Image (tube, coloured by chain):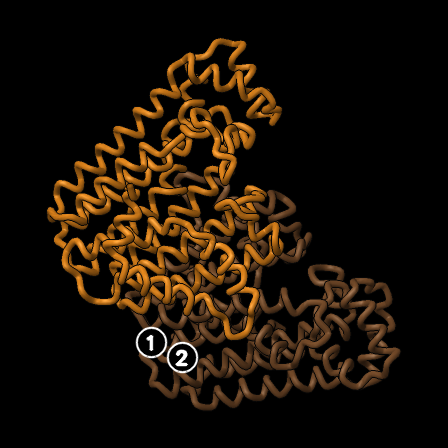
Chain colours: A orange, B brown
Amino acid sequence: MRKPHERLAEACAEEMAAVNALIRARMASEHAPRIPEVTAHLVEAGGKRVRPLLTVACAKLFGYDGQDHVKLAATVEFIHTATLLHDDVVDESRQRRGRPTANLLWDNQSSVLVGDYLFARSFQLMVETGSLRVLDILSGAAATIAEGEVLQLTAARNLSTTEATWLQIVRGKTAALFEAAAEVGGVVAGASEDQVRALAEFGDALGVSFQIVDDWLDYGGAGDGIGKNLGDDFREGKLTLPVIRALARGDDAERAFWREALEKGRADDFARAREIVTRHGTLEETRAEALAWRNRAVSALGRLPDGPLRGMLADLADYVVARPA
Amino acid sequence: MRKPHERLAEACAEEMAAVNALIRARMASEHAPRIPEVTAHLVEAGGKRVRPLLTVACAKLFGYDGQDHVKLAATVEFIHTATLLHDDVVDESRQRRGRPTANLLWDNQSSVLVGDYLFARSFQLMVETGSLRVLDILSGAAATIAEGEVLQLTAARNLSTTEATWLQIVRGKTAALFEAAAEVGGVVAGASEDQVRALAEFGDALGVSFQIVDDWLDYGGAGDGIGKNLGDDFREGKLTLPVIRALARGDDAERAFWREALEKGRADDFARAREIVTRHGTLEETRAEALAWRNRAVSALGRLPDGPLRGMLADLADYVVARPA
């Protein structure tokens, strides 16, 4: 049984082949071979390409038959790849998509500068569409992403982080680009104002639920040994939803535990952290929160043209919250 | 006696006040106070604002009386500030404009992410002009800058670096943004095709001569104790023009010296390096090369409307090559 993103990829196979060809063509550099080397390492590691798929599918939903959705899908993947390169430097990560990170294989310098190059290339690509509306949406998304990353940096190890700040970080990390990816697909395809708004709401809600599941998995998952490990967020001092809510309900002893672990970075008792978020029910609430955002995503889809693609997008929203622990 | 960039700043005082106000307004972040903190540290350290001045002056040269040149000047300064933040991470710098660098005062993470935010903000600003031509020029410049930085990274400590590669690095480091800054000023002011080309040539040549003088100063200067120190390029293993040419003319003993110093990073005998580039005359040739690019800059100015602003731009080109050692 194929997964929803695989069926979506099959329905958009022709466009996605064009997207991949465009990515390969534009990651080239006449002068600096380091650029395609680093980019290829990440691009060819087999990410699911969910973001470019969203752009292509959301344009096809309206019967679009031009080429701008392909350009914008490649744009979105370049922005995503650039943020991954910079994230891995910021987090000092050693693994990504089951492979050593670029900062480990080359160095931090290459990751920073190749990321900058991909950002610049993404802007060149979107300029080629000639749509100022698309440029406005994507440059705004890029600002929200960077702002969310800075916010995450300064909120880490800060026990007074609010749910509002946490949601802003979630938007920056994931939802802003999902939202823009879906929205620009509709814009180039000439969707109505309400449909474009529905696409933006769908992308945003899909991205938020995706990220909440990620936060949930860090405490509630089984750990897959590949990519993200159980307890990574805990050890990095990240204030995610299960922790923010458990903190608010805990007694003095628990608050002292979180302060030691997250503020002072002595996060050596993950089992206790897990016990606390389970006992207060905040882990379960986090999962329910992800489901609520999944429902918003599906409800936004109701305002879009019916058909097989819309069904696959709804399945994608289901799949996101049902990801295996 | 005021310096040329000071007279230019005075002639554009009103616009530059608007540029500074716009920079302050747009570096704000509703959610992440770290962003304006880091940006202000660099923006208010009193750089000369040569790049935004170029944009404003090149628009005023054609009697432009709109507001887009102010937006584009702020755009250009944001791009410049973002590259400085990332450069200091890449070079592990500790001083910039006579103050500790942001990566030292905060951390590498903040420098990378705030730089990304400023890039995104710069794109938002340029999109507001609604000029696709301007967007094309500036996104192309951003790609050339990042490509040049990667090239510099991979060319460092590589004795087979050619003059062509070196010039490409110079364009990326400095000339690409000077060129774009001048060019977009003319574009928004409605200059003719030939005038826009002349502005681009002027900016490019000014930037190349500026960077060559910088390379020269590293071996030929007296070292001002503030900012850049004598021999920094040598210790960082950078292949600049005086070294590339001295290498081609040196005997086996000299080649062994450069290999030890630059390739293997044992650059402990700067006096000998200086003696070699002086004896082969390549230090003097480097200065002559800077003068030749200054002449190209002034000659391009000849195709632009005559008047006091054009005179100041010519003085700026003189000042760049006459910078005190």
Whether residue B36 is visible here, answered yes or no, is no
Please tell me how many numbered marks the rendered image carries. 2
Query: Which chain is mark 1 on?
Result: B
Q: Position of residue A296 (x, y in %)?
A: 22, 34
B128 sits left or right of B161 in the view: left
Quick check: B323 left or right of A278? Answer: right
Residue named by callout 2: B61
User: Which amino acid type is marked by label 1?
Assistant: Ala
Secondary structure, mark 1, is loop
Closer to the N terminus: mark 2 or mark 1?
2
Dot 2: chain letter: B
Query: At 54% across and 83% down in the image, what residue appears?
Result: B314
* Placement of the C terminus of chain A among the 4 image quadrants: top left
Q: What number is the disc on residue A324? A: none
Q: List x then y, in percent, for residue A148.
A: 42, 42
Separation (CA) of disc 2 from disc 1: 9 Å
Residue A256 lies left or right of residue B281; in this view the side is left
Q: Residues within 10 Å of mark 2 (few under 14, many from 20)?
A: some
Q: Residue at x 54, y 63 (%)?
A: A37
Q: Are marks 2 and 1 in contact (CB under 8 Å)?
A: yes
Q: Which mark is residue B189?
A: 1
